Amino acid sequence: MTNEAAASGDDADLGDIQRQHWQSTYLANPGMYGEKPSTSAIQAAQIFGAAGARTILELGAGHGRDALHFARAGFTVHATDFSDVGLRQLRERADSESVEGLTTEIVDVRAPLPLPDASFDAVYAHMLLCMALSSEEIVTLVREIHRVLRPGGTLFYTVRHTGDAHYGSGIDHGDDIFEQGGFAVHFFARAFVDELAEGWELRRIDDFEEGALPRRLWSVVQTRR
């Protein structure tokens, strides 16, 4: 497929293609990210704990290494993903290790979150917002996150940004979305982070690296007013 065709929208729905790609990836590589929690999850757990949070909604939990970390730390965790394969792996591991306080649900964040208003103290999304979502879908999703958070609740998310080595390379799908090795990423500009913080209290933005490339990311912490 040419870059022009991808950017024009002539290809099939990118989100659905990515969902199938992740399903296949989890089937071929169970526990592909390992058993240890990400550095972001360790940091988020500290921030959530300091804020007095007890209930966490994780968006894009995958096979659950971070969700399990939160549950072991004493939080009540609702882990969601659009991959039933990843969530099945999460449930199997939680059951085998007798981890309590953890529920799972298949959720496609392109649709309204099937959750009640003001039902969580914190929301965690590690590299979920920078997947194959349009800017409009991301803005809508952050509004939904605001809705399901309790007043004063905390959102912790991480995204790859435009300083990343992969930004501008690979298949160009438009809207700052580029695909490398079958994985599509929406790279964030700082102005977009600020836009998503409108109506929130923006607490901090930290630049960090992850992986062998290395990937360049921001972690963002903002609270519901």
Image (tube, grey):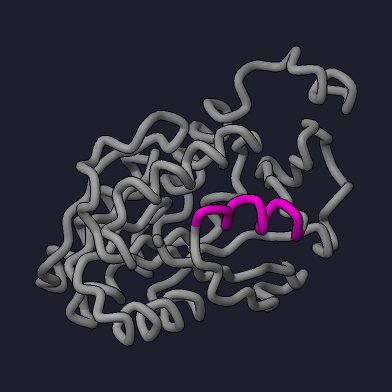
On the picture, is 55 further left or further right than 127? left
Residue 197 shown in magenta: yes
**Residue 67 in view here:** yes
Residue 188: x %, y % from top left: 72, 53
Residue 50: x %, y % from top left: 32, 87
Is 64 situated above or below 45?
Answer: above
Residue 16 shown in magenta: no
Q: Quadrant of residue 136?
A: top right
Which residue is outermost to the top? 10
Q: Considering the image in quadrants, where does the C terminus appear?
A: bottom left
Q: Quadrant of residue 96?
A: bottom left
The front one of 45 and 38 is 45
The front one of 43 and 25 is 43
**Residue 62 in view here:** no
On the picture, is 3 further left or further right than 140? right
Total marks placed: 0
Residue at point 39% right, 50% down?
Answer: 146
What is the span of residues highlighted in magenta in the rendered image?
190-199
Residue at point 65% right, 69% down?
Answer: 218
Residue at point 40% right, 82% down?
Answer: 47
Residue 94: x %, y % from top left: 18, 65
Q: Considering the image in quadrants, where does the N terminus appear?
A: top right
Residue 38: x %, y % from top left: 48, 75
Magenta segment, prevailing SS (helix, strand or loop):
helix
Residue at point 33% right, 65% down?
Answer: 153
Is 150 situated above or below 136?
Answer: below
The front one of 212 and 66 is 66
